Image: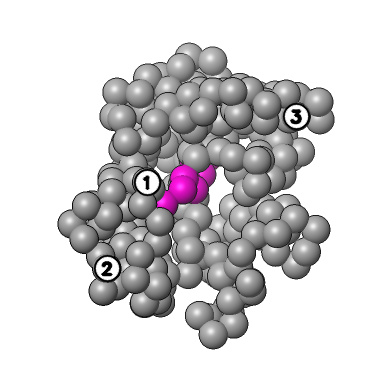
Amino acid sequence: MKKTIAIIGAGPGLGLSIAKKFGANGFQVALISRNADKLNTLVEELRSLNIEAAAFPADVYNKEQVIAAFHDIKAKYGFIDVLEFSPTSGIFPPTPASQVTEENALDAFQALVVAAIRSVEQVLPEMLEKRSGALLFTTGLSSIYPMQMMGNVGIALSGLRNYVLNLHADLSPQGIYVGHLALGVFIKPGTVTDPGLIADAWYDMYVNKDKAEDTFPQGVTPATIIW
């Protein structure tokens, strides 16, 4: 029986590349994001590569929509073996620390931390029952390093990283892999920051399960971000 990966925040860049990588290795793919038309386009591309895929539109801000999407995924595919979480940072753009407001900080927190917890809640009970599964979280480098220009987003991403590493400590003894990959790049297809290379790094982490987190590229810092 094929394994299933659910990708939260699926888009034509990294989400699609992760879907292709896991799909090429025997996974069927469930794609979740707000825009149904864009999801259907991704599904068509994956199916053209003989990858079983389906769209499950949902807004991560909406708890009922997220619950319904996961219910439908389980009805179609059964057990969700891997959850990959990489939505956009929210409604507001990254904001310098001196311009952080209650509104733009709360929005980032809801889009990243609350949405992550909400998504994990939909798959974790079954993973614990089977003592199997993986939770993968993709963030930016401001999850690890304070970056002044990422004021509102950095607050949320550092909180998300804290949650992820604590999940790893809790769940690894129970057979569930939890991983975090922080990107120090601006993704550009056809370059050293091609999303396919990031998907390769993710698949290697998933297969090896030997570390809770890494950066892409390995060892990148705010001073060496690839623009």
Q: On the rendered image, what quadrant is the C terminus found in?
A: bottom right
Which span is picked out in magenta?
82-89
> Residue 197: x and y, percent?
72, 58
Residue 159 visible in the snapshot: yes
Q: Is residue 185 magenta?
A: no
Q: Secondary structure at mark 1?
A: loop
The dot on residue 45 is 3
**Residue at image mark 1:** 91
The dot on residue 17 is none
The quarter holding residue 101 reads bottom left
**Residue at image mark 2:** 99
Q: Mark 2 is on which residue type?
A: Gln
Q: Residue at x 80, y 58 (%)?
A: 190
Identify the colour scheme used: one colour
Question: Which numbered disc flags the more N-terminal residue, 3 or 1?
Answer: 3
Q: Is residue 177 above or below residue 67?
A: below
Q: Calculate the distance from the C-alpha at mark 1 to the C-alpha at mark 2.
A: 15 Å
Left or right of 109, for residue 77? right
Q: Within 10 angstroms of label 3, few (less than 14), some, or many (20 or more) residues? A: some
